Image: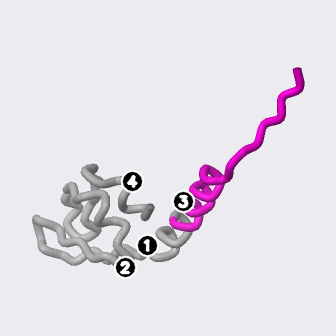
Amino acid sequence: MEPKDLFKGQSANLECPGCQNKFSVAAESLFTPDAVVYCPNCNAGIHLNNSDTIDTMQRTLDDISKLLNKSTRINLKL
């Protein structure tokens, strides 16, 4: 599973650093490495420095997946 899969169908609110316009984008787009989103008001490109965050989330998801896939053996003594 990729981080962007967790946010499919969700939206995220952003504020343009240029004109302070508040707008929404697809949340999954925030998890595209080094994504650029554009303000619908002033068309300024907003570069998301998110590669480190995406890498960290991916490692965490991989660790969780490994834990969930481990079979656990339970011994019961009656």
Real-space Cα separation, disc 1 to disc 4, in angstroms: 16 Å
* Residue of label 2: 34
First in sequence, mark 3 or 2: give its number.
Answer: 2
Relative image position of residue 59 (x, y in whole percent):
58, 67
Q: Residues within 10 Å of mark 4 (few under 14, many from 20)?
A: few
Identify the mark at residue 12; answer none if there is no mark. Answer: none
- Element under disc 4: helix
Give the amino acid type for the residue marked by disc 3 in the picture: Leu
* Label 2 CA crowd tier, 10 Å (few <14, some 14–19, many 20+): some
Determine if the magenta segment contains residue 14: no
Q: Quadrant of residue 22?
A: bottom left
The verdict on residue 66 being magenta is yes
- Which residue is found at the position 88% from the left and 20% from the top? 78
Q: Which mark is residue 6?
A: 4
- What residue appears at the point 27 percent right and 60 percent down from the top-left corner? 15
Pointer 3 residue = 61
- Secondary element at image label 1: loop
What percent of the width, then of the height, locates residue 26? 24, 58
Q: Position of residue 3 (x, y in %)?
A: 43, 62
Dot 1: few (<14), some (14–19), or many (≥20) neighbours within 10 Å? some
Question: Alpha-carbon neighbours of circle 3 within 10 Å: few (<14), some, or many (≥20)?
Answer: some
Q: Do callouts 4 and 3 mark residues in contact (Cβ within 8 Å)?
A: yes
Asked if 4 appears above or below 77 in the picture, the reply is: below
Q: Earlier in the sequence, mark 1 or mark 4?
A: 4
How far, Cα to Cα, is label 3 from label 1? 16 Å
Callout 1–callout 2 Cβ contact below 8 Å: yes
Of labels 1 and 2, earlier in sequence is: 2
Residue 24, percent across and down?
21, 55
What segment is highlighted magenta in the picture? 58-78
